[in-house]
Image (tube, rainbow, N blue to C red):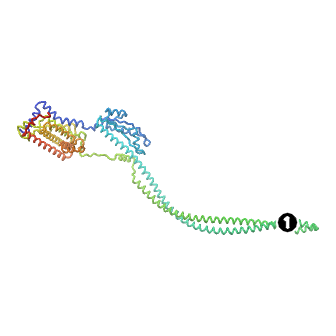
Amino acid sequence: MKVPQMIAAEFRRLTANPMSIVALVALVAVPILYGGLYLWANQDPYARLNQIPAAIVVDDTGTTVDGKTVHYGTEIADELVKDGTFDWHVVTPGSAASGVDSSKYDFSITIPSDFSEALASASSSSPRQATVTLTTNDTNSYLASTIGQQAAEKIRVSIVKKVNEQAAQQFLMGLASIRSNLVTAADGASRLVDGTATAQTGAKALADGTAKVSTGASALSSGTAQVASGADQVADGAQKVADGNAQLAAKANQAGAVADQVAGAVPQARQAIIDRLTAAGATPAQIDAALAALDPLGVKITSGNAQVQNLVGQVDQLSAGANQVAAGSAHVASGAHQSAEGASQLASGAQQTASGASSLSDGIGTLHTGTVKLHDGLSDGVAQIPDNSAELQKKQAATIADPVKLANTSITSAGTYGAGLAPFFVALAAWIGIYALFLIVKPVSRRAITALHSPIKVTLAGWLTPGLLGAIQMVGLFAVVGAALQFPIANPVGMFAMMATASLTFAAIILALNVWLGSVGQFLGLVLMVLQLVTAGGTFPWQTLPGPLAALHHVLPMSYAVDGIRQLMYGGNPATAWADAGVLALWALIALLVAAIGVTRMTHFRTLRDLRPSLIG
């Protein structure tokens, strides 16, 4: 009996009656149903997030910014509802709490009353963080809670972007204002440079003039000292003249008094002469004659007295004037001394002024140099601050708030969540399909063992029968993945070949387990499936596995089946796919060799143990 005949005999046994056919069809459909339904259910769940009910509570009371009332909480809630990522419902706090508790909403977002105020505080002297509260309930769905956390993080990033954009815009506006002020300052500094240049010229002229004033003040001081000395001499002479005039006035007064007495005695003397002439018996004629001779003398005496008195008055005036001259000369001398002292102080002050004017000239020169540097520095500062328009400032603020845009340049791309899981579930379905087939397919033909005594042929027949059925399973599963679910497949022929290779490899492994251990081997096939389910790296990266499980990832065949299907489905590296196929082929070869050794043992060494009933089935 040849291998094809043994395969045909096994197929005749499997289709001997209608129930056998139904059982065979059902077991062949197992991987199609498992893989197809699971991938259909998870085809693209992220595209249906808008069907997840979520609540928004807006308690924000708003705040005042630059004289305007803003409600950031309401703005964010409106943006979320408009975005439509989830089925958002704006509700009251009580409705949100009861809704999350009763599974009406998968999660809720609460924006507190001080939300706007907290956001606006970023530019104040008392900044504080704004709080957004996420409420979840894992009894609704753990993944829904995880998705809610991701949504809250996106909201936080959106808020940060909004705040950063406003802060950046305020900063750029302030920078523009600073630039405007710097331009004004630079213009002022330019005028200051011109003014200090003029001041420098004036300070030099002032220094020259004060030097001349100092020289003149020194000469004036010397001259006023000489004047003071001459004034002292004049004052001394004038005092002597005043003293002499005073003595003269005294003598003149004495002479005037005598002359006045003589003039006053003339009438008495005239009367005494008349009386004596009368007593002597002179006749009136004689008396008149005598009086005629004497009266002219009396007139002269009176006239002389008047002249003397006039002269005395003049001498008195001369004495008084001499006294005034002496007093004036003394004042002049005193003033001359004060003038000399003032001139000396003036000379000293003029020297100090000249020295100060020289220092001022030097200082203004330094000031001029400094103002030139100030002007140049302000001009450089203005040049370094860009003169941007309001529209450009708005764009710059948006860029500063969100400076990095993630550009996804994937070497390969699955496209959807379901397509990303497809390689893992296809490989797992292939194992489950082969495992299910061995529930009705006999691992080896007892008749063939007895008749042929050829372990190789018996082993190949026992392997190819479930292997061909497994290939049929892969045809159906491939049709579900590519046609029914319309997942993109970069290399359809290569992917199906990899699926068929994986199915044949799994058939060889389960065959070896059944040949050696019987129903216990069938159970170990289930255990091996569980091990591969957690170590294949079909969902999370295998690097996240614990150490022992990560080591098994590099050994067990399903890891290579998953990787090979990925490479061919997503358009990855063909060389890697060939390497994965080589590892699967090596597993198949080793498993067939082990199975053949088991069949050889069964052919030549039959024992009572082989006749014992199976533990399972």
Q: Quadrant of residue 460?
A: top left
Camera-side residue of 463 and 494: 463
Q: Which residue is mark 1?
A: 265
The reply to whether residue 81 is in sight is no
Q: Residues within 10 Å of mark 1 (few under 14, many from 20)?
A: some
User: Residue 284 placed where, x, y %?
Assistant: 93, 66
Q: Quadrant of residue 89?
A: top left
Q: Tag 1, which secondary structure?
A: helix
Q: Quadrant of the N terminus?
A: top left
Task: Check the image and report above or below for 341 versus 104.
Answer: below
User: Residue 525 placed where, x, y %?
Assistant: 16, 38
Q: Quadrant of the C terminus?
A: top left
User: Residue 554 placed where, x, y %?
Assistant: 19, 45
The reply to whether residue 229 is in sight is yes
Camera-side residue of 201 and 556: 556
Disc 1 marks which amino acid?
Answer: Ala
- In the rendered structure, the answer to whether residue 401 lies left or right of residue 8 reads right
